[in-house]
Image (cartoon, grey):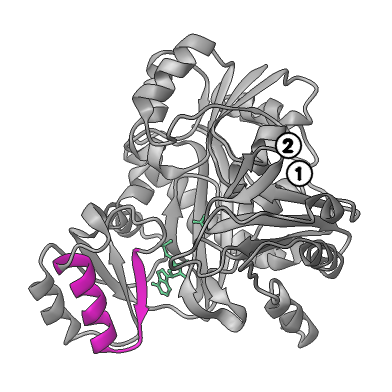
Amino acid sequence: MKVLVIGGGGREHALVWKLKQSPRVEKIWCTPGNGGIAADAECVAIDAGDVAALVAFAEKMRPDLAIVGPELPLVNGIGDAFRERHWAIVGPSKQAAQLEGSKIFSKEFLQRHSIPTARTYGAFESASKAYTALHNVPFPVAVKADGLCAGKGVLVAQNFEKARDFIERVMEKSELGAGGKRILLEEGLEGDELSFIVVSDGNSYAPLVPTRDHKRVYDGNQGSNTGGMGAYSTDDLLPEALRKTIVSTIVQPTLAGLAADRIPYQGFLYIGLMLTNSGPKVLEFNCRLGDPETQAIVARMDFDLADVLQNVASGNLQTSKLRWKPGASACVVLASGGYPGRFESGKRIEGLAGAEQITGVKVLHAGTQGVSDEVVTSGGRVLGVTAAGPTLGAALGAAYAAAEKIHFEGMHYRKDIGRHFNSLKASGN
Ligand code: AMP
Ligand code: GLY
């Protein structure tokens, strides 16, 4: 098989790394890839959102399978462009990708199908109407820009001033671009978050192992939101009773709702959940795999990913069995100084080889670039130090031991990935 992986972050490196282990895969292209992916695939400098250029590339190279990492090409219609040409691709249609591309679309979908989610206070096209509505809502309130905003489109505000200030920046100053033309106000939920990702071939689906992301930049969930500073996976995250509730009240109604609305869904569907005192509720849908959740998920895969994804693309998922390694996995993100704000690039990265000598560890690259014989930083999230182990403690221990061997100027990372879960377990919750 010749495979095209679209994207160039840590998620795509995880996919490429796993695909390369398949005896069936003879060639992998990655567009645009990064400094680490270059060791495992042929990187081709095509912007991930550029559907026309990706179609032209596929026309020439004829990959047997394409796998889409980020949301932008999906929202731009790459799924439809490939399927119209009868080319195998894993990723939903433009219409289905609206579940992520428009928060108002996804909220209306959730309400139409009675799927548990935060109570909504309304969708607004003008800032003044949103300010008026804010006078009558309880806090905390979640303010959400409708469109794609690269992870910056949501603020959970504790008071009127903070909510008003965010609406002003998003709607009046257009700080987030076109994604902020409309906003949604909803109830701010409290609880632990859980990423529940399924893969569907349009008819049947299979769940992936559960994961938890760490969105805030600093330990103890302090500081601004990021794309994700680390993730972990263990089956204990999802006790059987909770798993059943999630499947029956959220996953099945979501897939049935898509079918009823005549929106076939093929690809990964990421369901972001808040585990509240009154049960699991949907915070968001993403039309793709999570980053860094994928790094933790791939570390636990005990199946041929190329095989399974080919079955997804051809509607034969039922013939696949997804086997998972027992135990746990963890991914610790090493970020550039200043991230998620302004940061400098081009810093030389040292210690990569030593880090990978630790048993069970794989260093997955996100914002890196190869320059001569060196690897330098080129993004906010630079590396995802990923490890699997028999227990969460073992996986975290290996990932942190490896992280300590790596260095670049300004590097910072959270020291408490997975710790909240360990303390919950210790307290018997
Ligand atoms: P999203 O941009 O929809 O992915 O949301 C990003 C993050 O905002 C989520 O992972 C949550 O941490 C938070 N969030 C979104 N909606 C809510 C809500 N209704 N209540 C509390 N937190 C929320
Ligand atoms: N880690 C969260 C996301 O991929 O959206």
Task: Give the magenta range.
Answer: 153-172
Q: Is residue 232 left or right of residue 313?
A: right
In the structure shown, which secondary structural element does the residue marked by tag 1 occupy? Answer: loop
Q: Is residue 406 visible?
A: yes
Q: Tell whether position 120 is magenta.
A: no
Q: Nearer the viewer, mark 1 or mark 2?
A: 2
Do tag 1 and tag 2 residues touch (Cβ < 8 Å)? yes
Q: Which residue is mark 1?
A: 301
Residue appearing at x 36%, y 60% in the figure: 114
Which amino acid type is shown beneath numbered disc 1? Met
Q: Is residue 209 visible?
A: no
Q: Quadrant of residue 391?
A: bottom right
Ligand 1 falls in quadrant: bottom left
**Picture coordinates of residue 2, whole percent (x, y):** 64, 17
Density class for disc 1 (Cα within 10 Å; few <14, some 14-19, many ≥20) is some
Q: Position of residue 80 (x, y in %)?
A: 37, 25
**Amino acid at circle 2:** Lys
Classify mark 2: helix, strand or loop.
helix
Image: 261 above or below 346:
above
Q: What residue did someone put label 2 on?
A: 18
Q: Residues within 10 Å of mark 2 (few under 14, many from 20)?
A: some
For the residues labelled 1 and 2, the Cα–Cα distance comes to: 8 Å
Q: Residue furthest front?
A: 372
